[in-house]
Amino acid sequence: MHEGVRLMCPVCGAELSEEPARLYCAKKGHSFDRARQGYINLLTVQNKHSLNPGDTKEMLAARRRFLDSGSYEPICLAAADTIKSFSPSASPVLVDVGCGEGYYTAFFKKYCNASCIGIDISKDGARMACSRDKDILWLVATASHLPLCSGSADALCAMFSLFQPGEYARVLKKGGCAVEVTVGNEHLIELKSIIYDEVFEQHKQFTPSGELFEEVSCAEHKFSLTLDNGRLRDLLLMTPHFWRIKKENREQLEATRELTLTVHYKIRTLIRK
Ligand SMILES: C[S@@+](CC[C@H](N)C(=O)[O-])C[C@H]1O[C@@H](n2cnc3c(N)ncnc32)[C@H](O)[C@@H]1O
């Protein structure tokens, strides 16, 4: 069972109890079975706006190959160090929202000595994440309605995923931290200039954090990454750029043997007031 983790029934809001094969609420008897691979689906029909929401199997497989190659390890380490330094507990309950196939979650668990909950709206994501670490609680759920009791988490992270200030503030304890990583303006600019005929600099801002958080750090980092053709293809496949690339630009990319890219990311930390 998962030490210190307090989950909330997505149907009635009561606290859930955990058994090896399921989660259930004693109040109204709602029950959620553990899938054979180990994840639990807590996404209700009201919160499921399409048949298979979130990233597809192909995107997730490309993401796994790409991340396992170590290309984004500096980002993973920077986020892990931030969680470790701002978490109010030395063995935190940590929620990774939009965890995808679980690369960052599994690293954070070991590095931060955390009890981890990985949440993604994609069932294929949760299914794939189970093979990373069986001791992490992998859940299918939405960021806008997290299946966690109010004030139950020490730390929360959103790695290139959504930031929902109200809901994240609800599940964090007072003094808990939210760590968000997002892309900077020059992220993968060299790849974008092959994909698009004209590249506009994107000034992506962090979502306003609202009055329930105090921003305690915000930083930008850049590094260079040289990728061979296979890793380039994986990088393209795991992003929405894949759907936008024209045939002639795809052919140019397929003929590119190696490309050096700028990785530009931003990381901010908020503390729950
Ligand atoms: C860009 S990917 C990042 C995945 C992972 N954090 C990483 O960096 O490898 C965004 C993830 O958010 C998930 N996602 C999209 N909408 C979501 C929502 N409403 N609630 C939870 N997850 C969501 C997608 O399925 C996808 O796995």
Image: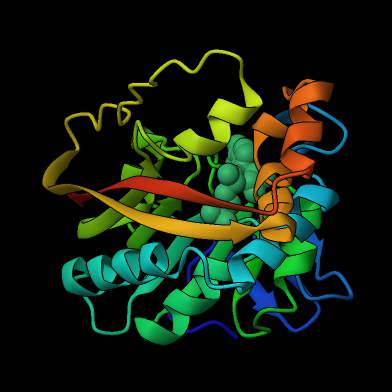
Relative horizontal placement of residue 273, taking residue 258 as reference (left or right): left
Q: Within the image, what quadrant is residue 185 found in?
A: top left
Up the image or down, 231 lies above or below 261; here it is below
Looking at the image, residue 143 sits to the left or right of residue 268; the answer is right
From the viewer's side, name the closer residue of 129 and 182: 182
Identify the residue at image location x=52%, y=65%: 71
The N terminus sits in image quarter: bottom right
Q: Name the residue at 72% across, 39% down.
A: 253
Residue 226, position as x, y percentages in the image: 51, 59
Q: Residue at x 43, y 75 (%)?
A: 108
Whether residue 11 is situated above or below residue 8 in the rendered picture: above
Viewer can see residue 48: no
Residue at 18% over, 66% down = 86
> Where's residue 228, x and y in %?
65, 60
In the image, taking residue 109 as reference, residue 174 lies left or right, namely left
Residue 14 or residue 237, whichever sits in front: 237
Q: Can you say whether 155 is above or below 254 in the image?
A: below
Looking at the rendered structure, the number of numbered marks drawn on it comes to: 0
In this rendering, does residue 16 appear at all? yes
Q: Position of residue 187 (x, y in %)?
A: 42, 39
Report the side of 37 relative to 65 (left or right): right
Rendering colour mode = rainbow
Q: Quadrant of residue 8?
A: bottom right
Q: Position of residue 100 (x, y in %)?
A: 64, 56
